[in-house]
Image: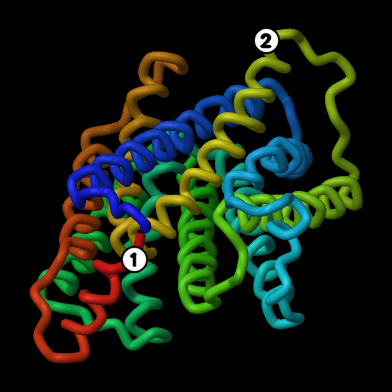
Amino acid sequence: MTTVAPRGNRDAQFFIILLASTFLMGSSFVSGKILLAQGFPAMLLVGWRFLIAALATLPLVRLDNRSMLAALMPKGMGIRDVALVVVIGLLQTTAVMGLLFVAMRSISASTAAILLFTNPIWVAVLGRIFLGESLHGARVAGLVLGIVGVVLAIGIAGQGHAAAGNMTGELIGLACALCWAAATIINKRANLPLGSWALSFWQMLVGSIAVLIMAYASGEHWPTVTTHAQWGWFVWLAIPASTGSFGLWFVALNKGGATKTSGYLFLAPLFTVVLSFFVLGTSLSWAQAFGGVLIGVALWLVNRDMPARNDKERLSEATAEGQP
C-alpha cells in the first residue's frame, strides 16, 4: 500500500527545493561574473562548467529509482524523445547559458539575473500561443507590469554609461529568457520518459559539448595561470550552482508543474542582488530596483492560482492535484 504524504508536507518540500535551487542559481551569476572579470573566456567557461556539472550529476541519476543505464536510456525512449532532449539541451544550456555569459561581459550580474528570470512571463505568453493556456485578467495585468519592469531595468539603467554596450548585453539577456521559456514549454509538452536527474544530465551534456565546440572553433583558450581561488569559484559554479540548481529545478518542475514552478523564479535575482552586494560590492539603481519589484509582482500575477472557469479547467486542476 502506497502512503501519500500530506498536502502540507508536499508543499513544504516543494518550497524548500525551490529555495535551494534559486539560491544556487543566484550564486552562479556572482561566481561567473568574478571569473569573467578576471579574464576567463565566456563560452569556454560555460562549456567546461556544464560538462563537469553533467558528469557530477551521474551519481544522482540513481535517485530516479532505476539502475543508471535504465534511467539514462529507458525502454520507452524513442527517436522523437532523443531529438527533444537534444533541443532542450541546446536551448537550456547552449543558448541560455552561453548567451548569458556573453551578456555579463557588459552588464552586471544583478541586471543579467533580472532579465533572465523574466522567463515565467514569456512562459505564460508561449503557453498561450502553443499550449492554448488561458490568460486571465490578472495574468494580462502581470504581463503588462512585467513589460514595464523590463523597460525600467533596461532603458533607464543604460543611460549615461556605455549605453550602447549595455543595451546589447541587456537584449542578449532577454534572448536568454526567451530561450529558457521555449525549453520550458517543450519540456512541458514532451512528456519524456526520463527522470529529473537523467534529463538534467543529458541536457547539460548536450549543451556543454555544443558550447565547447563553438568556443574552441572561435579560438578561445583557458588562462595559462589559474589561482586556487579561481579554481574554487569554478568548482562552485560547476557543481553546486549547476548540478545542484538544474537538478533541483527539474525535480521542482515534476512536483509543481512548469507554470507554478516558474512563478518562484523571482527569488533567484533577489539572491543575486543580495550576494552581489556582499561579494562584489555592487548595487542596483533605483530604476532597476523598481523594475525588479514590478517584475516580481508580475510573476506573482502571471502564476498565481486562479479559480477554474469551466469543466476543462476543473479537470486539469484535479489532474494536477493528483500528481506526486
Residue 170 drawn above or below residue 322:
above
Sequence-first tag of 1 and 2? 2
Q: Amino acid at mark 2?
A: Ala
204, 214: nearer the viewer = 204
Residue 199 is drawn in which quadrant? bottom right
Disc sitting over residue 323 in the figure = 1
Identify the residue at horizontal 55%, vertical 36% (top origin).
244
Identify the residue at horizontal 53%, vertical 75% (top origin).
191
Q: Amino acid at mark 1?
A: Gln
User: Which class describes the residues within 10 Å of circle 1: few (<14), some (14-19), or many (20+)?
Assistant: few
Q: How many marks?
A: 2
* C-alpha separation, residue under disc 1 versus residue under disc 2: 44 Å
In what quadrant of the picture does the N terminus appear?
bottom left
Dot 1: element: loop
Q: Is residue 287 visible?
A: yes
Identify the residue at horizontal 76%, vertical 40% (top origin).
55
Identify the colour scheme used: rainbow
Residue 312 is drawn in which quadrant? bottom left
Which residue, given by chain and number where applicable, does mark 2 sit on?
Answer: 229
Position of 261 with respect to 105 (left or right) is left
Position of 218 with respect to 55 (left or right) is right
